[in-house]
Image: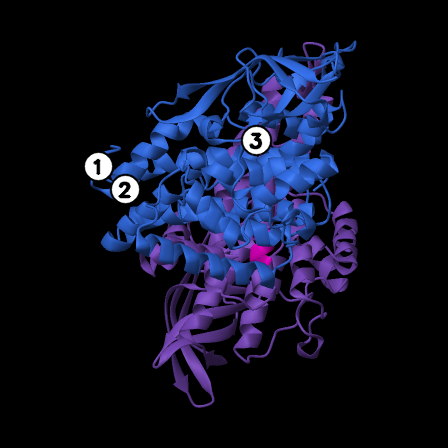
Chain colours: A purple, B blue
Amino acid sequence: MSDDQDLVRQTVREVLTAHPPVSLTAELTWDEGLWAELAAAGLTGVGLPEEAGGSGGEVADAVAVVGELARGAGAVPVGEQLLVAGPAVLAAGLQLPPPDEPLVAAVDGDLTAVPDGDGWLLSGTAVDVPWAGVALHLAVLAQGPDGPVLALVRAPAPAWTHANLAGEPRGSVAFDGLRAPAAPITVAAVADLRARAALLRAVQLAAALEQVLALTLRYAGEREQFGRPLGKFQAIQMYLAEMAGEVTAVTAVVDAAVQALEAGEPLVPAAATAKVRAGAAVEVVAALAHQVHGAIGFTQEHALHHLTRRCWAWRDEAGSELAWSATLGEHLVAGGADGFWPALTRVV
Amino acid sequence: MTHALTLAPAPRSDAAELVRAEVREFLAAEIAEGTFTPHVDTWLSGVDPAFSRKLGDRGWLGMTWPKEYGGHERTAMERYAVTEELLAAGAPVAAHWIADRQSGPALLRYGTEEHRQEILPRIAAGECFFVIGMSEPDSGSDLASIRTRATRDANGDFVVDGAKVWTSNAHHSHYAITLVRTGPPGDGPRGKHQGLTQLLVDLSLPGITINPIRILDGGHHFNEVVFDGVVVPAGMLLGEEGAGWHQVTAELAFERSGPERFLSTFPLLTELARRAAAGQDRAQLAAVGRLSARLLAIRQLSLRIAAALDRGELPDIPAALVKDIGTTFERDVIDEVRRVAEVTPSLSSPDPLGRALAEAQLHAPGYTLRGGTNEILRGIVARGLGLR
C-alpha cells in the first residue's frame, strides 16, 4: 500500500466521519450528502484521467476509495463510476460525464442499438441496473447490427425498481428508440466490462468483510458474560480465528486480482476468482459475526447490519457465485486436465 | 487489516517462472517414461529415493541454502515454484520432503559447522532423509509435555530413553531431529517450555527400534521410534541445550506454510477437472471453479509467506492461518467432488477419479492433524488477533 493510497483512504475516512451509515428506504435511496461532499473533494473522479474531466490517479487509488466507502457502508455509486462505468465509457471513446453526476453501467437486459445519422437509437430494457433512479447517466450495453455497442444516455426514470438486501436501489430501465451517442466495442471489451463489475463487488466485499471482523473483534473484547469478555472463551476464539482466515484469504486474492487489472493481465479469470472467493467468505464471516454479536447485532440500532446486509446482497450481484464459478471452471479446463494446473497458476 | 496476520503481497518472480517451466518439462518426461504415476498426498506416501536423487541432480533440493553446503542460493519463491509443481503433479517426493523443508533449514540455523558440512550436501543431493522427532504416545498437541529424556553420561554424551510417534518414513530415513527433555521444567504456565533440547539422532544407532504404525489404507508411512539407552554423541546437540522449544517454534514456520498444506488432494481435483472437461457438466465446472478460487486465495497467502521468508522474517502466525484454511480445503475437495460427480471410491478402481477419491478419503483425517491440529492453529491465530 503506497503513501498515495494511504492519503486517499485517510481523506475518505475523514469525509465518512460526518456521514455515518444510513438505513436506506423506498424514500431514502442513497446518501446524497455524502456524494456531494465526495464530489466536492474530487473523490468521485479518482483514477479517471484529468484530461477527461476526472481527478487523475491510479487504479489503486480508485480501489482505495471504493474499499474505504464499503468499509463505511457509504450509500453512493462511487465504485460503479470509478471502476466500471467510467473506464468503460473512456475505453469506448465516449465523452465522460462530469464526475459529480453519478454514472453507472447497465450491462444486463435485452437491448438493441441502431446507427442513425451521427447518433444511435437505443431500444429495449436494461435490467438489474445498479442505483436505478439515482444515477444520472447510464453506460448501456446493447446489441448493434455488427456486434456489441456501448451507449451513453441521460438516465430516464426507471420502469421498475427494487431494493437489494441492503436497501440499495436496483431496477429496470426501458428505452424506445432513444437517441444517444454510442460506439461499437469488442466482445473482449464486453467480457472485461462484466469482469470489472464483478471485481468491484469483490473489492467492496473484501473491505466490508474486514470491517465485519474488526467490529466483531471489538465487540468480543467489550462484551462480558460470565464475568469475562466473550473473546476469552475458547469457542469464540475459534470463531474469530475462522473469520480471520476467511478475511485474510479474501484480501490476498482480491489484492492479486486488482494487480491483474493494473497490469492489464486477463481480467475475467482473476475477477471471477476474486468474486467467487469473496462471496463464499460471506457465508462464514457474516454468520459468525452475528453469532458473536448476539441479539444486539440483529437490530437496526447496531451498525453491523449495514455491512452484513451489503455482503449478502453484493455476493449475488454482478454475476452470481454459480455463474462466475462455472465461468472460471470452463476457463481452467479449456485445455483439458493436463492444462488445468498450468491455467490455475496463470490466473493471479 | 489491523492485526498480525497481514503480509505484503508477494512480488512476481521471473526466476521462479523459469524454474517452474523446467520442472514441468522434467515431470512431463518422467510421466511419459513411466517413472511414476500421480497419486494423492505423495509428500507423505510417495517414497522414491531414486526420484529424490534426480531432483538433487537438477539442483531442486536445498535450493535456498549457501553453495558451500551444497545449496544453490536461490530464493524461497523459486523453491516454492519447484515444490508446488511437484505436488500438483502428484510426484513421489516423500523421501526427501522433511529434510529439504525443515531439517536442513534447522541445521543451517542451529547446527554446528561440522553438521552443515557433513549433512547438508547429502540432503541437497537427495541422499539423506530426515524425520521429525516431536510427538510422543502421550504428547500430541501438548508438545511441551514430552517425556523422552536425555541425560549426560560420564563422557558428556547424551543417553536417550523414550519413544516418538508419527515419524513419517523413519524406516527409510537417516536422522531424526529429536526433541527431548534435558532439564526440569520451570514454574508458571510456560515453565514446561524450559529444559527442552533438540538432538540430531542417527537412526542407525544401537538401542533404536523402529516399529511400523499403519494408517487407514494399510499404508506404512508412520512409525514408532523407540529409544532404549541410546548414546548420542555430545557433538550431536542441535543448537543450545534448553532452547529446544524456541528452536521447534521457528521450525514450524517452515513446516506450516508451504504448498503441501493445500495441494495434498490436488490430483483429485485434477481428475474432477478431467471429468468436467469431458462432459462439460455445469455443476462440475462450477465445482472446479469454486474449489479453484479457494485454492488460489490460499496460494496467494502461501506465496506471501515465501516472500516474507525471503526477507528473513519468520511469519509463524500467518503460517498457522494458512495451514488451517489450506488443510480444511484439502479435506473439502473430497465432498465437493462427491456432490457433483457419479463416482465410486476404490483404491483398485480402474477410474482415476474413483482411485484418487479413495486415496484422498482414506488419508483425509491426517490433513487437519499433522503439523499442529487446526484447533491449535486457530489458537495461534487468536493470539495474533490479540485474544490471548
The secondary structure that most of the magenta stretch takes on is: helix
Q: Could one spot residue A327 in this view of the protein? A: no
Inter-mark Cα distance, 3 to 1:
36 Å
| Label 3: chain letter | A
Q: Position of residue A239 (x, y in %)?
A: 58, 26
Q: Secondary structure at mark 3?
A: helix
Inter-mark Cα distance, 2 to 1:
8 Å
Q: Which residue is mark 2?
A: B353
Asked if labels 3 and 1 share a chain, the reply is: no
Q: Which residue is mark 3?
A: A242
Relative horizontal placement of residue A119, taking residue B130 as reference (left or right): left
Q: Secondary structure at mark 2?
A: helix
Q: Which residue is mark 1?
A: B349
The span picked out in magenta is A254-258
Q: Callout 1: 10 Å neighbours few (<14), some, many (20+)?
A: some
**Residue toward you, B1 or B369:** B369
Q: Extreme bottom residue here?
A: A117
Q: Evaluate if marks 2 and 1 touch, with contact meaning CB atoms under 8 Å apart.
A: yes
